[in-house]
Amino acid sequence: MENILKDIALKLKNSDNIYILSHQNPDGDTMGSAFSLYYSLRQLGKNAKVLCTDEVPKKFQNFKSGYEDLDFEPELIVSVDIAATQLLGVKLEQYKDKIDICIDHHRTNGIEATLKYVDVNAAATCEIMYQLLVEMNINFTKQIADCVYTGMCTDTGCFKFSNVTSKTLRIAADLIDLGCDYAEINRLLFDTKTKGRLEMEKQVLENMEFYCNNKVALIVISQEMLKKTGIDSAEIDGISAMPRQVEGVDIGITMREREEGGYKVSLRTNEPIDASKICQKLGGGGHIRAAGCLINRELKEAKERLLEQIIPLF
């Protein structure tokens, strides 16, 4: 594995024009990975560009400070925190068969690439990115450190999820030593909510459904609710954790209606339930405690298909 990381570092240093792909509905990890790599490559004098089907969420707009949208043709295409080509979204679909380097931490990763580094023990792709940038001898500016720290803290729930390891915490400590503004990042991501986010929380709590003797909690986020509250993907990620926070609940389900139809499903589970196995049966994947899938059905049928996989577990 370490040899692959060295090969990726060498390939990046020997290339001049690089596209960096992030997944649709971007979270802190894909954004942190993409922008930390972007600023590192620019530091080395490379042409680099971050691509995403969706807009950069409001909470991560600071990543764009100093970003230059350069116009060039790529000789190298890198995907970060993308487990499947479907997650590229419509705007990046053209690159699904052109990925040269894949960097990820999802054990269900199905990306085909010339160089592929997937560490399922890493709490976040940004944890891997830190190691890669060290291998590349990058000078960790405050901005790069902020990007990496953001990805790590968002994918670990501010370092409280079971995916956190001693290595994760050591890297976070290194980033603090390197000058990342960890207190402000934590405040903005975990202790600050928009009025739209509070209104969305109110609506989903009022309509939360329970199954399997209250061991399964389900919420639905409709397009109407999204338009009314005006929240973006980063704020929805926080809401996805709410169903599992109810005492006695072992599986928390969030069903988000998509503009093009169907539902994006997010599962959060407690031991010993494997969220990724449930989602794999529905064409998705992810981690043991957090996974997702797409169900292209009307709400009633989408719920039925999902619950068919869950109810037998109890």
Image (spheres, rainbow, N blue to C red):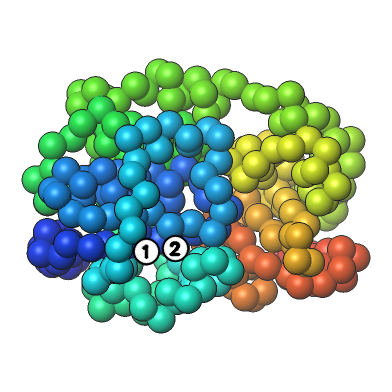
Marks 1, 2: nearer the viewer: 1
Q: Is residue 297 left or right of residue 253?
A: right
- Identity of the residue drawn at 69% across and 60% down: 264
Image coords of residue 131 (percent x, y): 20, 48
225 or 215, nearer to the observer? 225
Q: Is residue 131 visible?
A: no
Q: Quadrant of the N terminus?
A: bottom left
- Identity of the residue drawn at 55% across and 48% down: 55
List the single residue furthest toward the front.
Answer: 71
Image coords of residue 185 (percent x, y): 43, 25
Displayed quadrant of residue 117: bottom left
| Badge 2 amino acid | Ile
Q: CA distance from mark 1 to mark 2?
A: 6 Å
- Identity of the residue drawn at 48% across and 36% down: 60
Q: Is residue 267 left or right of residue 221?
A: left
Q: Which secondary structure, mark 1? A: strand
Displayed quadrant of residue 91: bottom right
261 or 305, nearer to the observer? 261
| Neighbourhood count class around disc 1 (C-alpha, 10 Å): few under 14, some 14–19, many 20 upward | many
Q: Is residue 16 left or right of residue 256?
A: left
Q: Are marks 1 and 2 in contact (CB under 8 Å)?
A: yes
Image coords of residue 2 (percent x, y): 15, 62
Name the mark on residue 122.
Answer: none
Report the residue marked by disc 2.
82
144 or 244, nearer to the observer? 144
| Neighbourhood count class around disc 2 (C-alpha, 10 Å): few under 14, some 14–19, many 20 upward | many
Report the residue marked by disc 1.
79
Can you say whether 222 is above or below 110 in the image? above
Can you say whether 268 is above or below 12 in the image? above
Q: Quadrant of the C terminus?
A: bottom right
